[in-house]
Image (spheres, helix red, strand yellow):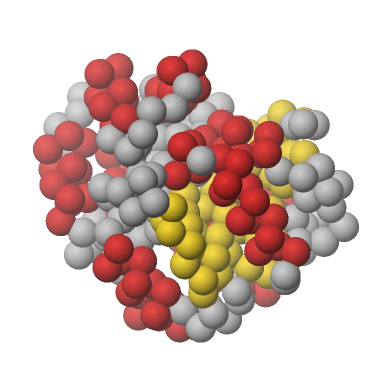
Amino acid sequence: MIQLIDRIDIGNGVRLEFVRQGKGASNPLIFLHGVTDSWRSFETVLASLSPDIEAFAVSQRGHGDSDRPDFGYQLGNLARDVAEFMRSLGIERAVIVGHSMGAIVAQRFALDFPEMVSGLVLIGSMSNLAGNVDAQLFYEEAVRPLGDEVAPELAREFQESTLARPIDPGTLDMLIAECLKTPARVWKAAFQGFKDVNLTPELPKIDVPVLMLWGDLDNFAARAEQDAVASALQASTLVIFEGNGHAVHWEAPELVAREIEAFVSNL
């Protein structure tokens, strides 16, 4: 059960919303959500985790009820936020769990702050967005033309597009509501920040164990992308969830939680 919902000043003028649970003695988990989501993206996974595992889930800047500054939405900024978050809470090393954008931030964090990482869990992962035609097209057609507001229809369409199977309607409505907390300017800044990202050449520098979780009906992160990331990493395991989409942690939270627990237990 979630023990605390709070906000913390991470020392750079930004306050981040987060939750924490569990009382594990080592290898705490830090969950990083996808673009336009919040910590609540992992609510059902957290509910399925053993209380013996200490876990934190963060709403990254601009998302959820975290601060929404006018700047700082490049991957390097988001990775530094994670480092400052950990320092603010006295966490020396952690397993970073990221979904989609969060998985990309996790990779950047492991490259920039290797001494703070004991393992990575990458869900629906990508590393080369510069070569992702679908991501570029979505930015040009749906995100760049945004005005001052994000239409509820766009938020629903975007969230539903990450699914290959139905989830609880109340949970989906909550996720759409969280999505609508992200201002249009943050959508633009975040997606624009993705355009030229290609971390693949740097991935061999990551020397911690990596667990990759992927749904075989993922419309955003292709199997070829999973294979490219896995082959570039020094130590990785790819687990494929058949019949699941990009948001496999929404569709199969209990199974995702079990895979994460097994991974942590072997570190």
Q: Residue furthest front?
A: 242
Instruction: Tell me if residue 67 comes above or below residue 128 in the rendering.
Output: above
- Front-most of 23 and 35? 23
Please state if 217 lies on the left or on the right of 60 as rendered: left
Q: Where is residue 111 in the image (x, y as percent from the top left)?
A: 52, 73
Q: Is residue 12 above or below residue 59?
A: below
In the depicted structure, whether residue 8 falls above or below residue 235:
above
Kindly indicate the quadrant of the structure image that contains residue 66: top right
- Residue at point 48%, 62% (across, down): 239
Please say whether residue 58 is visible from this viewpoint.
Answer: no
Q: Is residue 120 left or right of residue 90?
A: left
How far across and down, in percent of the image, does residue 213 sit? 48, 57
Q: Residue at x 75, y 31 (%)?
A: 2
The answer to which quarter of the image holds residue 184 is top left
Please state the horizontal and vertical placement of residue 240, each as a whole percent of the image.
43, 59
Residue 141: x percent and y percent? Answer: 12, 38
- Image: 134 above or below 154: below
Q: Is residue 32 left or right of residue 55?
A: left
Q: Residue at x 52, y 53 (%)?
A: 98
Quadrant that contains the N terminus: top right
Residue visible at 72% across and 71% down?
Answer: 267
In front of the other: 133 or 49: 49
